[in-house]
Image: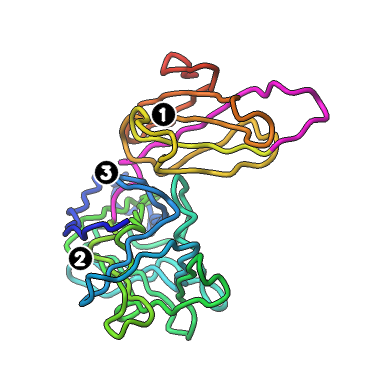
């Protein structure tokens, strides 16, 4: 699958708030979450890998894409850097291929209240801290280079109120995240086209619940497929999750606003057994949906 790189600019981030009275607090809390909201993307388990100079590069499926984060820092327009969070030991390693429909707290901390215009997320400089694992070569990871070992977001407008909490979301699009290195070996991170910073309030949460038909003592694995809108091809969801055996609920967080269809199956039980549901996810919404057969709708909201 060849995906043409699109120039996706980072929109100015505006978080409004009110300070609850001068001198009432010396700090506020800033939290940065990491995830893949799935905005306009395709399969979770494949990446478009495009050579910087060789357009005939063969595309391979990517199983894992590891990045090791070290710290989160913010800076006002006229001032120095404040450290929000520093990871322990050798940093926090994250496989970004596991982030679809999930929100991982990357770090949080206390900073002076006020408006910040720059955000910097530093990554490890250690050898093998960042790597790409291809399905064809699971025991032979390739190195991933990150420019200056940091992610920078400038000209943003982030307000942290005293005694308050500001929640941010680092939205990673794995389809544009890496490029083949110029030497043909290893990969380079492509943050401008693949990572954006936005308020957590622009995304939604969906909790799905269902009942299982089999008798007590039986146990089967479950699979959840998520489609943007109505599925045109049930073999091509944008997200597939393997759930625990006999699970009866799952929560998807960091979801982009839009219409979704959810299909639950039990491949080891009965290929014909399915539960369905549809839901419109709204920004800053905390939605609940009961999956049913043959289908359920927004009327199932609790």
* Residue 260 vertical position relative to residue 65 in the rendered view, above or below: above
- In this rendering, does residue 108 appear at all? no
- Residue 99 pos. (x, y %): 46, 53
Identify the disc placed on residue 1.
Answer: none
Is residue 261 shown left or right of residue 135? left
Label 2: which secondary element: strand
Residue 285 colored in magenta in the image: no
What's the residue at 51%, 32% (across, down)? 207
Note whether 29 is above or below 67 in the view shown: above
Comes first in the chain, label 2 or label 1: 2
Left-right relation of 6 to 70: left
As for residue 215 lying within the magenta part, the answer is yes
Label 3 with label 1: CB-CB less than 8 Å: no
Query: Which residue position is annotated with label 1?
Result: 261
Residue 299 in picture, x, y percent from top left: 43, 13
Residue under label 3: 18
Q: Secondary structure at mark 1?
A: strand
Q: Is residue 290 visible?
A: yes
**Residue 22 location, x and y as percent?**
28, 51
- Depth check, mark 3 against mark 2: the one in front is 2
Identify the image quadrant of residue 271. Answer: top right
Range shown magenta: 197-220
Q: Residue at x 48, y 39 (%)?
A: 252
Which of the labelled discs sits on residue 154, or is there none? 2
Secondary structure state at the residue bearing disc 3: loop
Label 3 or label 2, whichever comes before in sequence order: 3
Q: Nearer the viewer, mark 2 or mark 1?
A: 1
Mark 3 or mark 1: which comes first in sequence? 3
* Foreground of the two, 273 or 148: 273
| Residue 274, quarter of the rendered image | top right
Question: Distance from label 3 to label 2 (Cα)?
Answer: 23 Å
């Amino acid at each position: 699958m060849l995906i043409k790189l699109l120039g996706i600019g980072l929109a100015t981030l505006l978080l409004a708030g009110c300070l609850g009275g001068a001198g009432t607090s010396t700090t506020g809390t800033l939290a940065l979450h990491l995830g893949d909201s799935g905005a306009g993307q395709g399969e979770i388990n494949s990446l478009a890998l495009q050579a910087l100079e060789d357009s005939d590069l063969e595309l391979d499926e990517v199983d894992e894409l590891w990045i090791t984060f070290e710290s989160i820092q913010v800076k006002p327009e006229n001032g120095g850097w404040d450290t929000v969070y520093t990871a322990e030991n050798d940093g926090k390693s994250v496989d970004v291929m596991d982030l679809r429909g999930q929100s991982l707290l990357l770090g949080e901390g206390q900073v002076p209240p006020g408006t910040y215009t720059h955000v910097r997320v530093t990554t490890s400089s250690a050898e093998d801290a960042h790597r790409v694992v291809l399905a064809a070569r699971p025991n032979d990871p390739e190195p991933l280079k990150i420019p200056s070992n940091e992610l920078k977001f400038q000209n943003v407008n982030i307000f942290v109120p005293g005694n308050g909490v500001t929640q941010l979301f680092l939205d990673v699009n794995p389809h544009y995240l890496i490029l083949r290195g110029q030497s043909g070996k290893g990969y380079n991170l492509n943050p401008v086209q693949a990572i954006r910073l936005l308020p957590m309030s622009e995304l939604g949460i969906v909790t799905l619940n269902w009942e299982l038909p089999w008798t007590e003592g039986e146990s089967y694995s479950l699979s959840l497929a998520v489609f943007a809108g109505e599925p045109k091809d049930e073999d091509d969801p944008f997200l597939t999750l393997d759930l625990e055996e006999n699970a009866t609920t799952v929560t998807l967080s960091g979801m982009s606003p839009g219409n979704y269809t959810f299909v639950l199956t039990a491949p080891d039980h009965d290929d014909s057994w399915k539960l369905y549901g549809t839901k419109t996810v709204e920004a800053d919404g905390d939605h609940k949906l009961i999956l049913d057969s043959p289908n359920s709708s927004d009327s199932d909201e609790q």
